[in-house]
Amino acid sequence: MAQIKFQHLDLRICPKCFSTFFPCDQTMAFRSDLTDKSRELWLKALLAKNVQDPVCDNLCCIDHGEPLVAGKLPDYGYDGKVTNCCKMFHMPPSMTIQLLKRTLEHPFQQPAKEGKHHFFFIRLLDALVDRLFGEKMPDEDPLDLVQYSLHLKPILEPETSND
């Protein structure tokens, strides 16, 4: 089980079946601590792998070994398996896909709306300078990829050795 700790999120992902575990009281951190780009790339990786839910009989808490019981994921209302000992929630890949889609379709924080006053002039000047010097902004901001590349990619897209 791979453990990833973000600011307020203690996320665990199984590198074999891609099931996800995290504490029930951290559901909002799933949205706020994971960048939109990380969630988007995580979703793409799961869809590309066409992951199937594993057969899960007698699930237990990954920390305490206590059996999981039927419960709901707070703030989302998804049915699933929860521990009694530490309120750890288990999501099979299909539920992770559903949650990732939902959080991407309905962003947690709406982007700030920019006024039209001086931003237009700055963008126009920037475009002219780029055109004069032949520079082009990258399609994606490399900083948006850092969280996914450092924490999720090694689990979701491990490099295979050709040795």
Image: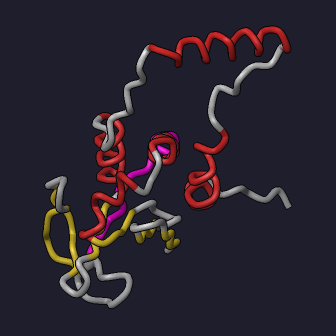
Q: Which residue is drawn at 21% across and 69% down?
A: 81
Q: How many marks?
A: 0
Residue 103: image location, x then y, percent: 32, 43
Does residue 59 show up magenta in the picture? no
Which quarter of the figure is the C terminus placed in?
A: bottom right
Does residue 48 show up magenta in the picture? yes
Establish if 144 lies above or below 2: above
Residue 11: image location, x then y, percent: 42, 67
Q: Which residue is drawn at 47% across and 67% down?
A: 14
Would you say 160 lies left or right of 8 here?
right
Q: Which residue is drawn at 30% across and 66% down?
A: 26
Residue 123 versus residue 95: which sits nearer the camera?
123
Residue 116 versus residue 141: which sits nearer the camera?
116
Residue 44: image location, x then y, percent: 49, 40
Would you say 145 lies left or right of 45 here?
right
Residue 121: image location, x then y, percent: 58, 12
Question: Residue lying farthest front?
Answer: 118
Q: Residue at x 41, y 20 (%)?
A: 115
**Region of the chain picked out in magenta, as a range:** 47-57
Would you say 75 lies left or right of 100 here?
left
Establish if 24 lies above or below 40: below
Name the colouring of the figure. Answer: secondary structure
Establish if 86 lies above or below 3: below
Q: Is the magenta stretch mostly helix, strand or loop?
A: loop
Residue 146 versus residue 116: which sits nearer the camera?
116
